[in-house]
Structures are given as structure tokens and as C-alpha cells.
């Protein structure tokens, strides 16, 4: 295939294992890459959830696969300590041979400047033209187009609308959201996407460390069971509408909404929500159905019928490319 993403990432199939907090455990990331797709390291998952020193975690993944892996960089301005830690993690990733970065929640110009001298590529999460313009001005190499069917932080536009708006920039565009089976995969490529990014489908795999109840909830869920809440990070996040979610308000209170809408305070308020949610999400990954507060998932749950091995998932999606 004459596919710019494949050339830049060095992988066999145009599939990315989306970075997930708290579900991107090292074994899952490695299995995705070993099967010919691109596994993405989520630093907070690797260090806070899995308990690894960042460099040692990367080296552990390298004992499981020598194929390319990438790294997720959350760049929204927050505390000085966090920003310094993220910069150091990028330096370590470069030292350990990572050459593909997915940036999220901010302006990626400083990441581009940091990694381009090493020949690394940066793809930025975008949900609309506004963020695409910021990404282009920053010198990114491609987009991860997050649509309205995505899990985790979701967009508002459909996958059809996003590719129409983003193709004008002449950069590779990755479809993020709603893909869990071959039909959706092939449709995305036919529309002009260079690759797809999947998260929900990979949670319901044997290599993911999420609880059996979490995985089964994905298998059992339909599109109508996915709802949006802003009480995890302050921006819309897709979750399964469990009995515990139904007991909660999905939107922040009046005071919190004021802070989230204020240009000076919104970043602090989002960080407050993130810090408050870290333990809850970590606990929820291992929780039983009756205990879970948040189980993140996208509308692609409708195509997840069985818990499978990662290799099996990727082979089924990519079979038409061979």
C-alpha cells in the first residue's frame, strides 16, 4: 500500500492501539505491535497504574516485542512538575528508540521541536478544523481524527465529516472512534483515512489487564449504552451506562461549570478533575460490575462480540489487505 502512515510508523498494518488510561498495560501494547500494528505507550498507565519506572517499563515492553511502538503525550498545560516530567519522559522515549508520538489536549509545537531532530513523527489528536489549524501551525506530521463514536475523550463530528474537512491539509489522517470490526476498518480506508485507531476493541482482549467484568460489559453493551460524562476530566468522556453511572449526574455542578468555561481557570479545573479521577479509574479497571464507577468505552462496543487475542483481532481486520 502507498500509505504515508505505514512509511512513517514502520508497521505492517494501518492500525493503532489507542493509548488508554488505565488500560494500556505493557503486555497489551507489546501484543499490538508484535501483531503488526502500532502499540502506543500511555505514560501514566505505565508508571502510575502498572508501577514501572518509565525507562524500565519501556525496556520491559522491548523484551516482549522488537517491533515499533509509540508514545502518547498529554500536553495540556497543568502543573510545572507534570510538564517537566512529561518532557523527561519524551527524552527517555527518544533515548529508547521511540520514533512515533501521538499528542493530545494542547498545542504540540514544543513536542514537534523536541522530536523532529531525531527523525520522529508527531500525529496530533484533533476533533475539528480549529485544532487541525493549531496542529498544522505546530508542524505535525499527521492527525488522529477523534470522531463522535470514540471512547475516552470524544469528538462531535462524524468520521465522514472529519475526513472531508481534514484532507485539505495533505497530511495522513487516522480515524479514531467507532471501529471494532473489518467492515468499519475497510470503510475508513475507502474514505481516505490512512489508518484507524482502536481502544475499546483492545480492552476486550486476553492481553488487556482489565477485569473480566469490564471486558464482558463491553461485549454486552450496545451503542445506546454509551453516554458522555464531564465529571472525569472536565471535557466529554464516553463511558458505559452502568447502574452506578445512572445514579450520578453526568455534568459538573454550576460552580465547576463556571470554572471550566473561564479562560484562566479551565486548565486548573480540568487538572482537578483528572487528579480526582485517577484513583477511581485505576480501581475501576479491576472492579466488578457492582463496584465500578467509570468504565470507558466507545460506540464501537456494538461490534465487539467476543473476548479475543490481540493477534486474532488484527488478523481479522487486516485480512482484506493481504
Image (cartoon, helix red, strand yellow):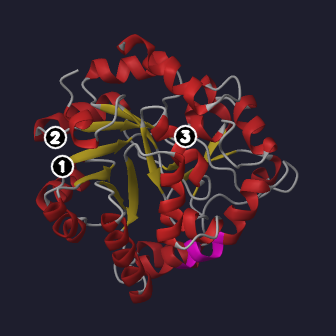
Q: Is residue 7 left or right of residue 39?
A: left
Q: Which callout, 2 or 1, points at the residue further toward the start of the chain?
A: 1
Q: Is residue 92 above or below residue 188?
A: below
Q: Which callout, 3 or 1, points at the residue further toward the start of the chain?
A: 3
Residue 112 at x, y = what percent? 19, 63
Q: Are marks 2 and 1 in contact (CB under 8 Å)?
A: yes
Label 3 neighbour load within 10 Å: few <14, some 14-19, many 20+: many
Front in this rendered view, residue 231 or 213:
213
Region rendered in magenta: 272-278
Label 1 neighbour load within 10 Å: few <14, some 14-19, many 20+: many
Q: Are marks 3 and 2 in contact (CB under 8 Å)?
A: no
Question: Could you say whether the residue bearing mark 1 is in a helix, strand or loop?
Answer: loop
Residue 286 at x, y = what percent? 77, 55
Q: Is residue 167 above or below residue 19?
A: above
Say the numbered circle drawn on residue 31.
Answer: 3
Disc 2 designates what residue?
A: 171
Q: Is residue 131 visible?
A: yes
Q: CA distance from mark 2 to mark 1?
A: 7 Å
The answer to if 321 sits in the magenta stretch is no
Front in this rendered view, residue 296 or 196:
196
Q: CA distance from mark 3 to mark 2?
A: 28 Å
Q: Nearer the viewer, mark 3 or mark 1?
A: 3
In the rendered image, the residue lying farthest to the front is 63
Disc 1 designates what residue?
A: 141
Q: Is residue 169 above or below residue 246?
A: above
Q: Which callout, 3 or 2, points at the residue further toward the start of the chain?
A: 3
Q: Is residue 277 left or right of residue 67?
A: right
Quarter of the figure that contains the C terminus: top left
Label 2 neighbour load within 10 Å: few <14, some 14-19, many 20+: some
Q: Is residue 223 left or right of residue 144?
A: right
Amino acid at each position: 500500500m502507498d500509505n504515508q502512515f505505514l512509511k512513517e510508523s514502520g508497521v505492517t498494518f494501518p492500525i493503532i492501539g489507542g493509548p488508554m488510561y488505565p488500560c494500556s498495560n505493557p503486555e497489551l501494547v507489546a501484543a499490538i505491535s508484535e501483531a503488526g500494528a502500532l502499540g502506543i505507550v500511555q505514560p501514566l498507565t505505565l508508571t502510575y497504574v502498572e508501577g514501572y519506572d518509565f525507562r524500565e517499563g519501556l525496556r520491559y515492553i522491548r523484551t516482549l516485542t522488537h517491533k515499533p511502538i509509540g508514545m502518547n503525550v498529554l500536553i495540556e498545560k497543568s502543573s510545572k512538575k507534570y510538564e517537566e516530567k512529561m518532557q523527561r519522559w519524551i527524552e527517555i522515549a527518544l533515548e529508547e528508540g521511540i520514533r512515533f508520538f501521538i499528542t493530545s489536549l494542547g498545542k504540540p509545537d514544543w513536542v514537534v521541536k523536541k522530536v523532529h531532530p531525531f527523525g520522529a513523527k508527531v500525529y496530533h489528536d484533533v476533533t475539528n478544523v480549529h485544532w487541525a489549524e493549531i496542529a498544522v501551525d505546530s508542524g505535525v506530521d499527521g492527525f488522529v481524527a477523534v470522531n463522535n463514536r470514540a471512547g475516552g475523550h470524544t469528538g462531535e463530528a462524524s468520521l465522514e465529516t472529519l475526513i472531508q474537512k481534514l484532507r485539505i491539509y495533505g497530511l495522513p489522517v487516522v480515524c479514531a472512534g467507532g471501529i471494532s470490526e473489518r467492515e468499519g476498518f475497510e470503510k475508513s480506508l475507502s474514505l481516505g483515512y490512512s489508518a484507524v485507531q482502536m481502544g475499546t476493541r483492545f480492552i476486550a482482549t486476553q492481553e488487556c489487564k482489565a477485569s473480566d467484568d469490564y471486558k464482558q460489559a463491553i461485549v454486552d453493551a450496545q451503542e445506546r449504552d454509551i453516554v458522555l460524562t464531564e465529571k472525569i476530566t472536565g471535557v466529554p468522556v464516553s463511558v458505559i451506562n452502568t447502574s452506578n453511572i445512572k445514579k450520578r449526574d453526568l455534568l459538573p455542578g454550576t460552580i465547576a461549570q463556571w470554572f471550566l468555561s473561564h479562560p484562566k481557570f479551565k486548565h486548573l479545573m480540568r487538572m482537578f478533575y483528572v487528579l480526582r479521577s485517577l484513583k477511581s479509574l485505576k480501581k475501576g479497571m479491576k472492579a466488578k460490575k457492582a463496584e465500578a464507577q467509570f468504565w470507558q468505552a466507545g460506540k464501537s462496543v456494538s461490534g465487539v462480540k467476543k473476548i479475543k487475542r490481540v493477534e486474532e483481532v488484527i488478523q481479522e481486520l487486516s485480512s482484506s489487505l493481504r
